[in-house]
Amino acid sequence: MTPAPVRKEPESDIRVLMRDMGMRARAAAGPLARATPEQKSKALAVASMRVIADAPAILRANALDLAEAKDLSDAMFDRLKLDQKRVDGIAKGLREVAALPDPIGEIMAEWPRPNGMRIARVRVPLGVVGVIYESRPNVTADAAALCLKAGNPVILRGGSDSMHSSQALYACLRAGLEAAGLPEGAIQLVPTRDRAAVGEMLTMVEFIDVVVPRGGRSLVDRVQRESRVPVFAHLEGICHTYVHSAADLDMARKVTLNAKMRRTGICGATETLLVDHAVAKTHLVPILDDLAKAGCELRGDAATQALDKRVVAATEQDWRTEYLDAIISVRVVDGVDQAIEHINTYGSHHTDCIVTADAKAAEQFIGEVDSAIVLHNASTQFADGGEFGFGAEIGISTGRLHARGPVGVEQLTTYKYVVRGTGQTRP
């Protein structure tokens, strides 16, 4: 199979295009729900092999995207860029999802009733998934793989910046579907850059069962505001690392530097550092030095500025900002209660970490921080489905309904009740 060409449709034709894709996805739902675990795994394994074989073509396509990219921040440019290592990582992710246990048909719970009936809660596909994302071409493969494994047809609307890269990866995914005898409608990539396609997806309640936005606040806000389809919310990652008074200094330095600077453009990157007043002089100064030497801009409160002349004054907006860049806001706090209050006030309920050797303080932090992911003595950059053993993720859900945290295969399923009787009637 070869991918469809990048199309620029007249606006009047966008609705026809999207409705046609919706119908094909809905038609694929039944066959995909009945597909065997072997078929789904084969499709992903073949796609993985094609990614490796087509790596030169994928990198050439990515070079076109990079050449056309305009007005992108360094972080967004990094998200868009592929190299051989990242292409190998995409192939590895496909293999890892293929190797996951198939969730469909799993009996989640089963119990008898006094009248002799047996009731079982059985895992089933969620339905047709629409994924709307920006820049990152790896999402094309990750989202398709997870949806396929969970038995869900998927309509992918990638960012216009990554159109060539996504098309090249989509060709590999279609080859996998063909090899496994699965319907082409199981994975579809919207072949137009026109933003009207997003608007259509958000109204296609008869064809799409859930929409997953993955991108910046403007995209997520639009989806949540306009969608008539249920949404897995993925808000920005205003993530915190809190260095408690009982933190080991070497650990605090290592964890903080990694949490901020490993990759500044991902949603799990720490954006605000909180340090206890009791260890500000011993811990904060060397941590700031590490960050500054790594090229990070420092913005802080008055107490932080007093300790390091490189720190510029933080504004109220800094505490609410996802920089996605080599910038960090820093505040000195008076203990774990104030740290928790700051995080719950300014954070986005995404990912937050405490560094401490005090088990009681750690448990208080874990219990009271209202975030999808809470870590103790580990970098916030572990906020990733692959690191959780999910193989990949569609995104980090910061909502409370159905899915929270990394959205992997299991989170892309729902359940139904199966009741088995022997002729019982209700009195």
Image (cartoon, rainbow, N blue to C red):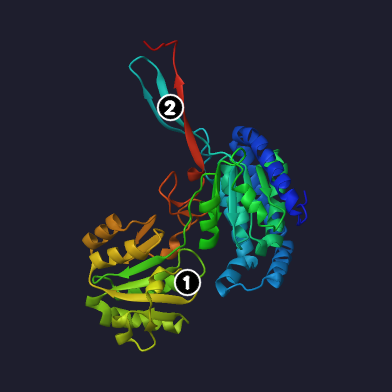
Q: Position of residue 290 (x, y in %)?
A: 40, 81
Residue appearing at x 42%, y 65% in the figure = 238
Left of 316 or right of it: where is 230? right
> Which secondary structure, mark 2?
strand
Residue appearing at x 48%, y 45% in the figure = 411
- In the rendered structure, which disc, 2 or 1, sits on the residue that comes first in sequence? 2
Left of 119 or right of it: where is 64? right
Q: Give the residue type that dot 1 points to.
A: Tyr
The crowd level at tag 2 (other Cα within 10 Å; few <14, some 14-19, many 20+) is some
Q: State whether residue 206 is above or below residue 85.
A: above
Residue 50 is drawn in which quadrant? bottom right
Residue situated in front as seen by the camera: 161 or 44:
161
The residue beneath circle 2 is 120
Q: State whether residue 141 is above or below residue 183.
A: below
Q: Position of residue 291 (x, y in %)?
A: 42, 80
> Which numbered dot is residue 323?
1
Residue depth check, mark 2 versus mark 1: number of the one nearer the observer = 1
